[in-house]
Image (cartoon, coloured by chain):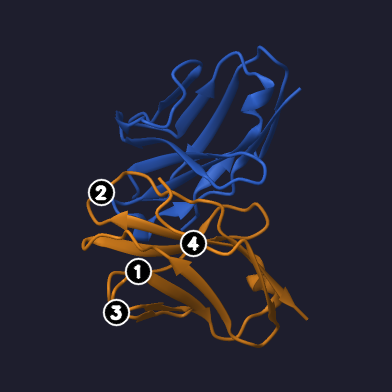
Amino acid sequence: DAKTTQPTSMDCAEGRAANLPCNHSTISGNEYVYWYRQIHSQGPQYIIHGLKNNETNEMASLIITEDRKSSTLILPHATLRDTAVYYCIVRGETGANNLFFGTGTRLTVIP
Amino acid sequence: NAGVMQNPRHLVRRRGQEARLRCSPMKGHSHVYWYRQLPEEGLKFMVYLQKENIIDESGMPKERFSAEFPKEGPSILRIQQVVRGDSAAYFCASSPDRDYTEAFFGQGTRLTVV
């Protein structure tokens, strides 16, 4: 099931950009990259997703490399409330009915 | 528009009892997914239901676990004869169609088996 690799943990200073990497070297052409986060055992929260182009919304930016084997989630100005576990997930548009969450990256925003 | 509502938020059961976890999807959502999260682990898919139908139960344990999503009322995840290993957080998500980009998760039910 594990199609993605993420660092176990990262720290980021408050107000700075948080850049969370994800490797998905076996991604296939019709698979999307999704990012979710889970704040302190709450329900997961959808952040952003993309196929090949970079994406931006009110929460974050997603940068996908040209070969699509890796991506980076960028939180432009991290706040203490962004401390959470961030999950990078690969899923086909019409593929599995489930999301495989893995263990994610635990981001700690430091004051 | 209320979010996905799960209740109870916390549930304590003795070994051998039954646990019933309820999930009310967001208004207009007819697709429900159940996930289980053991301590210090990621969420694991259990089952995907549409109204009155189980679409995918590939993640459900073969025994003691069942799920339903009736025409009226919430989705129910039922665990019979609970054991200590069932202690976990159970999350449900709902979406208007088979598209996770518009899926929202509830706050979960934390089941503790004593």
Which lettered chain is shown in orange?
A
Amino acid type of the residue that numbered disc 1 sits on in the rendered structure: Lys
Give the colour in which the image draws chain B: blue
Q: Is residue B106 visible?
A: yes
Decide if residue A27 is on the left or right side of residue A94. Answer: right
Amino acid type of the residue that numbered disc 4 sits on in the rendered structure: Tyr
Q: Which residue is mark 2?
A: A95
Horizontal and vertical percent for residue A30?
21, 61
The chain that hosts pointer 2 is A
- How many callouts does the rendering have? 4
**Mark 1: few, some, or many residues within 10 Å (few <14, many ≥20)?**
some
Decide if residue A76 is on the left or right side of residue B99. Answer: right
Task: Say whether disc 4 or disc 3 marks the residue closer to the N-terminus.
Answer: 4
| Circle number at residue A69 | 1
Disc 2 is placed on an element classified as: loop
The chain that hosts pointer 3 is A
At horizontal 62% and vertical 26% (from top left) the residue drawn is B86
Observer-side mark, 1 or 2, equals 1
Q: Are marks 4 and 3 in contact (CB under 8 Å)?
A: no
Observer-side mark, 4 or 1, equals 1
| Circle number at residue A36 | 4
Disc 4 is placed on an element classified as: strand
Q: Are marks 1 and 2 in contact (CB under 8 Å)?
A: no
**Mark 4: few, some, or many residues within 10 Å (few <14, many ≥20)?**
some
Task: Say whether disc 2 or disc 3 marks the residue closer to the N-terminus.
Answer: 3
Q: CA distance from mark 4 to mark 3?
A: 22 Å
